[in-house]
Image (cartoon, rainbow, N blue to C red):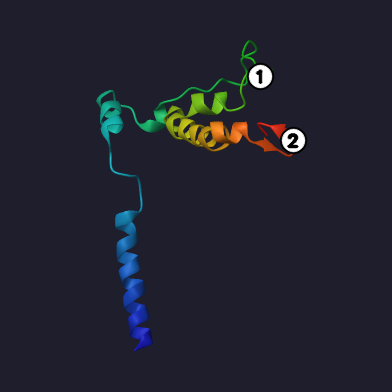
């Protein structure tokens, strides 16, 4: 009985995986890109290592800058994550309380 139930479970899992695997359903961005013959992988910009004038490791350039230029669709989730950190750690209540290092820490 247990073997039969296990076999049914494995068979159901095998048939369910192809339906759920793969790319998500196309949305409005995918449709707009398709009008121009593009896909999400075509969007973005990366500097070439052979470019001498491009600032490699510029002192005032943020570490995430190149990554967000290369994958612009990752910008919104990244900004939301940064905003969540700001709300959690830089709220007025936490800034007014004194920690072991003083106010605001």
- Front residue of this view, candidates 14 and 66: 66
The structure residue drawn at horizontal position 27% and vertical position 29%, both measured from the top left corner, is 34
The structure residue drawn at horizontal position 30% and vertical position 30%, both measured from the top left corner, is 29
The disc placed on residue 46 is: none
Image check: 30 left or right of 48?
Answer: left
**SS class of the residue under badge 1?**
loop
The quadrant in which the C terminus is found is top right
Which quarter of the figure has residue 1? Answer: bottom left
Image check: 60 left or right of 100?
Answer: left
Which quarter of the figure has residue 11? Answer: bottom left
Camera-nearest label, 1 or 2: 2
Can you give x and y, in whole percent of width and height, for residue 95 in the image?
61, 31
Q: Give the farthest residue toward the right.
A: 101
- Front residue of this view, candidates 63 and 5: 63
**SS class of the residue under badge 2?**
loop
Disc 1 residue crowd, few under 14, some 14–19, many 20+, Cα 10 Å: few
Can you give x and y, in whole percent of width and height, for residue 72 in the image?
44, 27
Q: Give the farthest residue toward the top.
A: 53
Disc 2 residue crowd, few under 14, some 14–19, many 20+, Cα 10 Å: few
How far is disc 1 from disc 2 in space, using C-alphas?
36 Å
The disc placed on residue 56 is: 1
Give the tally of numbered discs.
2
Task: Kindly check if marks 1 and 2 are in contact, taking CB atoms under 8 A apart as contact.
Answer: no
Residue 46, compared with residue 19, is above or below; it is above
Q: Which residue is mark 2?
A: 101
The structure residue drawn at horizontal position 64% and vertical position 15%, both measured from the top left corner, is 55
Can you give x and y, in whole percent of width and height, for residue 64 in the image?
57, 28
Can you give x and y, in whole percent of width and height, for residue 9 in the image?
34, 74
Q: Earlier in the sequence, mark 1 or mark 2?
A: 1
């Amino acid at each position: 009985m247990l073997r039969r139930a296990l076999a049914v479970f494995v068979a159901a899992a095998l048939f369910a995986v192809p339906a759920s695997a793969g790319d998500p359903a196309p949305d409005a961005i995918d449709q707009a890109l398709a009008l121009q013959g593009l896909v999400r992988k075509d969007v973005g910009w990366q500097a070439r290592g052979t470019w001498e004038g491009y600032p490699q490791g510029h002192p005032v350039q943020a570490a995430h800058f190149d990554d967000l230029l290369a994958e612009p669709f990752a910008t919104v989730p990244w900004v939301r994550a940064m905003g969540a950190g700001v709300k959690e750690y830089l709220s007025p209540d936490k800034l007014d309380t004194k920690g072991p290092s003083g106010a605001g820490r």
